[in-house]
Image: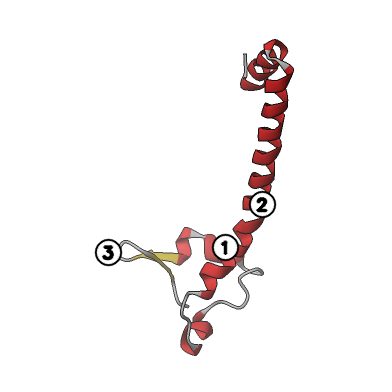
Amino acid sequence: MNTKERLLQEIEQAPDSLIEETLNFLLSAKSSYAKSESNVGEAILKLLEEIPLDNDDLEKLPIDLANQHDYYLSRENLTTSRKTGTLSLNQD
């Protein structure tokens, strides 16, 4: 029996006052969840604004990432630093 089935079984046995309270809780939880989902994008943008980039950094960013995403995702075009273990894009 899955969770939804168990919940329905419990609802069948619960008094109306408890069902109403449970419904109010569920609606409140759904509303909070929807608000947190919509704030994810805003939170990411806010974090990105905090990353300090100067003109030199901006010039190093690929301007055609959307057109050549396969190139940037291919492990053949990446080098792993032995010192830090980080990946970097091979410069052609």
Q: Nearer the viewer, mark 3 or mark 2?
A: 2
- Nearest the viewer among 81 and 50 is 50
- The residue wearing badge 3 is 82
Relative height, residue 17 to residue 48 (above, below): above
- The residue wearing badge 2 is 35
- The residue wearing badge 1 is 43
Q: Earlier in the sequence, mark 1 or mark 2?
A: 2
**Among all residues in the image, which is located at the extreme front?**
17
Residue at the image position 36 percent from the left and 63 percent from the top: 86
Q: Earlier in the sequence, mark 3 or mark 2?
A: 2
- Nearest the viewer among 21 and 56 is 21
- SS class, disc 1: helix
Q: Residue 45 in the image: state x and y as whole percent.
A: 59, 68
Category of crowding for the residue at label 3, using alpha-carbon neighbours closer than 10 angstroms: few (below 14), some (14–19), many (at least 20): few
Proximity of marks 1 and 2: CB atoms separated by less than 8 Å: no
Q: Earlier in the sequence, mark 1 or mark 3?
A: 1
Category of crowding for the residue at label 1, using alpha-carbon neighbours closer than 10 angstroms: few (below 14), some (14–19), many (at least 20): few
- SS class, disc 2: helix
Three-letter code, disc 3: Arg
Label 1 and label 3: CA atoms lie apart by: 33 Å
Q: Nearer the viewer, mark 1 or mark 3?
A: 1
- SS class, disc 3: loop
Task: Name the quadrant of the N terminus.
Answer: top right
- Nearest the viewer among 43 and 58 is 43
Q: Residue 55 in the image: state x and y as whole percent.
A: 50, 89
Q: Residue 78 in the image: state x and y as whole percent.
A: 43, 65
Three-letter code, disc 1: Ala
Residue at the image position 64 percent from the left and 45 percent from the top: 33
- Nearest the viewer among 40 and 11 is 11
- Quick check: 57 left or right of 30? left
**Among all residues in the image, which is located at the extreme left?**
83
